Amino acid sequence: MYALLDAIGIALRSIWANKLRSFMMVLGNVVAVMSIIAVVSLIQGMNSYVGDAIMRDVGLGTFRIDKTGVITDEEEQEEAWRRNPDVSLADLRAVRSFSPMTDTVMAEGFSRTNIAYRDVTLENVRVRGVSSEYQEFSNYSTDRGRLPSELEVARNRPVALIGADTAEKLFKDRNPIDQAIKVAGVHFRVVGVNERKGSLFGQSQDDFVVIPLGRFQQLFGSRRSLELTVKPPDPALLTDAMDEARVAMRVQRKLRAKEDDNFGLYTSDTLMGLWRDFSKGAFSVLVGIVSLSLLVGGIVIMNIMLMVVSERTREIGLRKALGARKRDIVWQVLTESTTLSTVGGILGTTLGFVAALLVEAFSPLPADIKPWSVVLGIGMTAVVGLFFGLYPAIRAANLDPIEALRRE
């Protein structure tokens, strides 16, 4: 233990005495560990953030039916959009009638238009038209007022729920409840303001208007494709309910057995799978960057340790003449190289924390620092120090003490 502490002390004194050389020695490790901490923290933060956003949008234990489904290729997406018929209320009725495992089905439409209150006009605001079942699925929770009731939506009353940003822009400090706004030039009465959701990738989630689906179709046309959200009575029946809904859609659209589905069907797990594939790709790029940085850093450590051994040839010869064994010399050099490398890992960890927090502070990307990434980063630098310090250590241990003492 004393020998270990003594070797660590020698290494730390060497760092302090040769600051520039020590910094150049561990620079590769600093870059590698900083990359690990910063990127892993951002990826973990994004995993939680995107997962929560997907669960809020799609919901747990539910699935969606839309015109194209989840297609990542842009050309395939455009082709599917041209080829597939729109999802309509007839499809909703088919799923509701011919799928016994379906508990509730909601239809919704999306568009963008101008919203106005008196002399204030907001351009390109998201408008969502919902059927009367929307409260069974949505994550809406009012901060002021109330949600449009099921009866109001079913009877297509001109009522609206608005987002917190929309309310702030339109009404400033005034109370928006029971005020009349214009959606695409048509009056709607505000019955509630949704609680603030924040932003997603820098895009506000609080700038929207929710109106009854019937009114939505009157404003934007009944031929606009809808999205259906389906919930079985038990989440454990989700797969079976999806199979039944697929059959109901195919029967409604008169598809033959060999014809492909001309609609999309997906769950939150589908979207999470796509995100996980993306994050794995980002992590693979990180592994390549880190591996290259560690390789360069390890080579630098080996070369500088060889130089250190050369500078301390007389010291090593004297120690061997006084009875130090080869393994004692190897242990000393390895301890020094590992200590130096680990110091670089600690410095990289600190810089990685700072980088992740700065990105979180000045961008919409969240960060989530994981303890295992710290252990991984510092552990990797320690292994690099051991591996690349082995050759200089063996070379030092094999020095002839008489020849070493003769060197000036």
Image (tube, grey):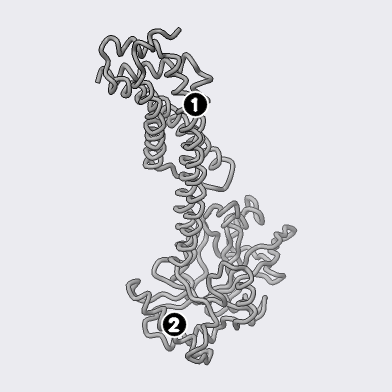
Marks 1 and 2 close (CB-CB < 8 Å): no
Image check: 180 left or right of 198? right
Image check: 215 left or right of 284? right
Assess disc 2: are there few (<14), some (14-19) or many (≥20) residues with their C-alpha within 10 Å of its C-alpha.
many
Q: Mark number for residue 245?
A: 2
Question: Residue type at mark 1?
Answer: Met
Q: Nearer the viewer, residue 69 or 99?
A: 69
Give the secondary structure at mark 2.
helix
Identify which residue is drawn at 50% across, 83% down: 92
Find residue 163 and report its horizontal and vertical position in percent.
Answer: 58, 59
Question: Residue type at mark 2?
Answer: Ala
Find residue 380 and report its horizontal and vertical position in percent.
Answer: 40, 37
State the quadrant of the N terminus.
top left
| Residue with the mark numbered 1 | 25
Q: Which corner quadrant of the image does residue 407 belong to?
A: top left
Q: Nearer the viewer, residue 284 or 246?
A: 284
Find residue 2 and report its horizontal and vertical position in percent.
Answer: 26, 17
